[in-house]
Image: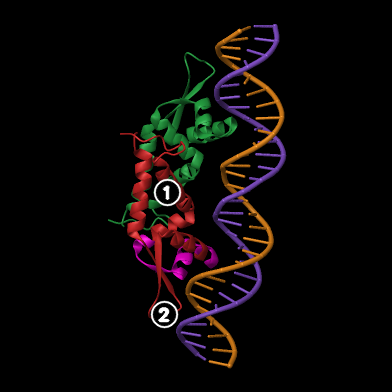
Chain colours: A red, B green, C orange, D purple
Amino acid sequence: MKNAPCCQKGSRSKVDLEKVTEFVKIINEPNRLKILCFLREGEQCVCDIWKTLGIPQNLASHHLKVLKDFGLIDSRQNKEEGRKIIYSSNKEAIKKYAESLNNFLISNL
Amino acid sequence: MKNAPCCQKGSRSKVDLEKVTEFVKIINEPNRLKILCFLREGEQCVCDIWKTLGIPQNLASHHLKVLKDFGLIDSRQNKEEGRKIIYSSNKEAIKKYAESLNNFLISNL
DNA sequence: TCATTATATCAATCTATATTGATAGATTAG
DNA sequence: CTAATCTATCAATATAGATTGATATAATGA
């Protein structure tokens, strides 16, 4: 049984559309995509992230905050070097959002 | 055999990153997502699109142009009512880009 | 203690692009 | 032919958010 189109008021699919819209907004930024990509290699401190991407430190911090607030990455303090904050990708969250987006794009095609 | 991370210079994965970045830019717009969603129902004229979405006609035309220039939708002239331009989704293109994006997001997770 | 390193935050600026308003061209109806 | 309809385009404005610059905090090392 098909839903009403997601573009119309009161559609159940509208929930998916909003979820997808929010996610796309987060990944619509090259540096954030690069961060997600870099974190596939494993967890990384901020200093390695901004140096690797070739962007200023505060810009990296900003994008990391956006990604973390949305739940796509996690952070913890390094035990040995307490100054460093280590970021890692939240694989479950990424998988969940990626699946929603993919379903939205290819459903009914 | 793993590639270099896509965030670094000269990576083969960088091609994917650029492709993904361009695609995400296109779908990072609620009205465009709604248009893609609406076109799942079948091909539609501009007048039905802007009325259904509740946006001005010229705004719909603008977003349709963006989607068409990128290749996600096609258009043709209506045979019966020659004034109308009928838009339809390019399913192959959408599938292709959706697949690239999904691969990018979930690879190596 | 003092200097250095790592990170985060805030305010200001810059930039891309969504939106609006006006209008033109093409088609059809009367 | 004239008016109405459908679509596209252009210029102007509005706006979201990326980037930068300055600075604060905390941890470490000398």
**Is residue A50 shown left or right of residue A93?**
right
**Is residue A102 shown left or right of residue C29?**
left
Quarter occupied by residue A6? top left
Give the SS element for disc 1: helix
Residue A81: assigned label? 2
Would you say residue A46 sits in the magenta stretch? Answer: yes
The percent position of residue A8, horizontal first and vertical second, equals 46, 36
Q: Nearest to the eye among marks 2 and 1: give it.
A: 1
**Residue occupying the far front of the picture:** A10
Q: Quadrant of the N terminus of chain A?
A: top left
Q: Residues within 10 Å of mark 2 (few under 14, many from 20)?
A: few
Q: Magenta segment range?
A: A39-60
Subunit under mark 1: A
Who is closer to the viewer here, A100 or B14?
A100
Q: What residue do we see at 53% from left, 31% from top?
A: B50
Residue B84: assigned label? none
Q: Earlier in the sequence, mark 2 or mark 1?
A: 1
Subunit under mark 2: A
The percent position of residue B91, horizontal first and vertical second, equals 37, 33
Quarter occupied by residue B109? bottom left
Residue B62 visible in the displayed image: yes
Q: Relative to C25, say whether A15 is above or below.
A: below
Cα separation, mark 2 vs mark 1, equals 37 Å
The percent position of residue B61, horizontal first and vertical second, equals 55, 31
Magenta stretch: dominant SS? helix
Residue B99 visible in the displayed image: no
- Mark 2: which amino acid? Glu
**Is residue D22 shown left or right of residue B33?**
right
Who is closer to the viewer here, D25 or B56?
B56
**Is residue A57 shown left or right of residue D15?**
left
Residue wearing tag 1? A19
